Amino acid sequence: MGPNRLGIRKMTADDIPTVLEIDHQSFPVPWSERTYRLELTGNPSAHFFVAELSSGGTAKVVGYLGYWLIVDEAHISTLAVAPGMRRRGIGKQLLKTAFRSAGRQGADRVSLEVRASNADAIRMYESLGFELHSRKPEYYRDNGEDALVMILYDLLGWIEGVREV
Ligand SMILES: CC(C)(COP(=O)(O)OP(=O)(O)OC[C@H]1O[C@@H](n2cnc3c(N)ncnc32)[C@H](O)[C@@H]1OP(=O)(O)O)[C@@H](O)C(=O)NCCC(=O)NCCS
């Protein structure tokens, strides 16, 4: 048995089946296996991490995050935590890992789109310093929902602040 340990590492192609499972449980329009493969192998601006829970000799992927580095901006492309593993700080941990990684790569801000009805995610982003930037009307094709564009403007300040703690 022993205690559970959460680690965050880069996603590999071997993680795709578990990531797809979580993706299907988390989003009305999940990404396809092909999309994940292309992102991991054919998109040099894409960076993906998984959160992995280890206990005893076994490890299980319980969440993942992707971002695209576009000049000085990191754009979160996807983020989800397995339904049974939410509210334990894993989503935040993934975001903090992405912040540090993107900061090292030269990003100075982080952007994302979130469904206007996704109160849980919006609260998480606000708690990390994201601010509402704008609204994209009827952005999601499956239900015509608006997207909120949220931005963390001072990524470098955020990284410095964490370092001082
Ligand atoms: C959004 C999501 C990734 C959050 O992951 P998580 O691991 O549960 O988040 P955390 O435990 O790190 O929560 C961080 C903070 O967000 C807020 N939050 C997250 N889920 C919440 C909920 N259900 N209710 C209220 N606040 C919530 C809280 O402020 C929380 O901090 P606290 O637990 O100290 O109060 C997860 O709910 C998920 O996978 N949702 C489905 C996919 C999705 O919507 N992804 C985002 C697309 S933009």
Image (spheres, rainbow, N blue to C red):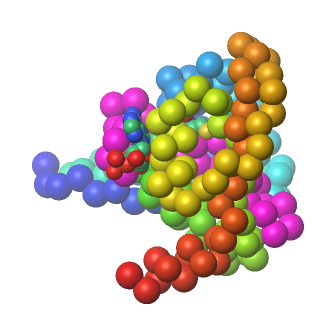
Indicate whether 51 appears above or below 135: below
- Residue at the farthest left position: 1
Residue 64 in the magenta stretch? The answer is: yes
Residue bounds of the magenta highlight: 62-89
Left or right, 47 with respect to 7, comes to right
> Where residue 46 sits in the image (x, y, percent)?
75, 54
Seen at 55% across and 41% down, the residue is 122
Near-viewer residue (25 or 36): 25
- Residue at the farthest bottom position: 164
Residue 123 in view (yes/no): yes
Indicate whether 99 appears above or below 162: above
> Where residue 105 sits in the image (x, y, percent)?
73, 74
Seen at 53% across and 27% down, the residue is 26
Task: Work out which quarter of the rendered image holds the C terminus and state it.
Answer: bottom left
Left or right, 115 with respect to 86, comes to right
Residue 22 in the magenta stretch? The answer is: no
Indicate whether 57 appears above or below 31: below
Indicate whether 117 appears above or below 128: above
Label total for image = 0
Residue 37 in view (yes/no): no
- What type of secondary structure mainly makes up the magenta span? strand
> Where residue 102 sits in the image (x, y, percent)?
67, 68
Q: Quadrant of residue 17?
A: top right
Left or right, 93 with respect to 38, comes to left
> Where residue 110 sits in the image (x, y, percent)?
69, 60
Near-viewer residue (104 or 39): 104
Near-viewer residue (119 or 85): 119
